[in-house]
Amino acid sequence: MIDTRALREEQRILADQIELQDPPGFITPTLIAGVDVGFEQGGEVTRAAVAVLRYPTLELVEYQIARIPTVMPYIPGFLSFRELPALLQAWQQLSSHPDLVFVDGQGIAHPRRLGVASHFGLMIDVPTIGVAKSRLCGRFLPLGDELHSRQALYEGDEQIGWVWRSKLRCNPLFISPGNRISMDSSLYWVEQCIRQYRLPEPTRWADAVASNRAAFQRWQRLSDDL
């Protein structure tokens, strides 16, 4: 039996530790990582992938995958507790040290301000940004159809993120700071990492690694030929 009351209290304690400002001296990252989590064998196995890209070329330089037994069932609002153990294992396997991390999920755009990007960011003490494909909470004004249209995402009077159209004729992204980064910088760095796809390159590559997509297979073949 999962004690959601205790988890909720832990979320509130951790959320109080979130820093919504850029760390001193943080200007331009050299390495940006993307992380993605999925589940295999009917949810029995949690798979986490980390892809590290060199900035500004956004070429893949390292990846790691961790597969571990799933530690708890899916409970809305408590996803980070389910995903974090595999994420931390994949992170610990890296030989490089990313300066910034994009997480496939929410940052502070969460009912208790502790989405997976914020929780993970606290654990690794590296600036993190949540890049989600859907809204968990908050409200926003209607978004224009034009490319790069944006609106602030609010809950009450508090801005908790951005809604941003990264590609024409596609649903927008929901971007929110995770930890150790400001609201404006969260959107700025996602903008800098968009190419021709809806997702920014770090999380797109993390998904490609996790799912063994064609782009990742091509990268592996080229690496083997070098």
Image (cartoon, grey):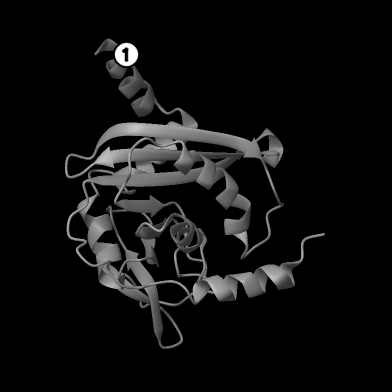
Label 1 SS: helix
Mark 1 — residue?
224
Other residues around mark 1 within 10 Å, as few (<14) / some (14–19) / many (≥20): few
* Residue drawn at (51%, 61%) of the image: 119
The C terminus, quarter of image = top left
Q: Is residue 183 left or right of residue 11?
A: left
The x, y position of residue 136, in whole percent, is 52, 67
Q: Is residue 90 left or right of residue 94?
A: right
* 109 over 54 or under it: above or below: below
The x, y position of residue 188, in whole percent, is 23, 62
* Residue drawn at (29%, 47%) of the image: 32
- Count of picture labels: 1
* 140 over 173 or under it: above or below: below
Q: Can residue 189 be seen in this view?
A: yes
Residue 157: quadrant of the picture: bottom left
The x, y position of residue 47, in whole percent, is 56, 38
* Residue drawn at (37%, 71%) of the image: 161
Find the residue positioned furthest to the bottom: 157
The three-letter code of the residue at mark 1 reads Asp
* Residue drawn at (31%, 23%) of the image: 219
Q: Can residue 111 be seen in this view?
A: no
The x, y position of residue 99, in whole percent, is 29, 51
The N terminus, quarter of image = bottom right
* 204 over 117 or under it: above or below: above
Find the residue positioned furthest to the top: 225
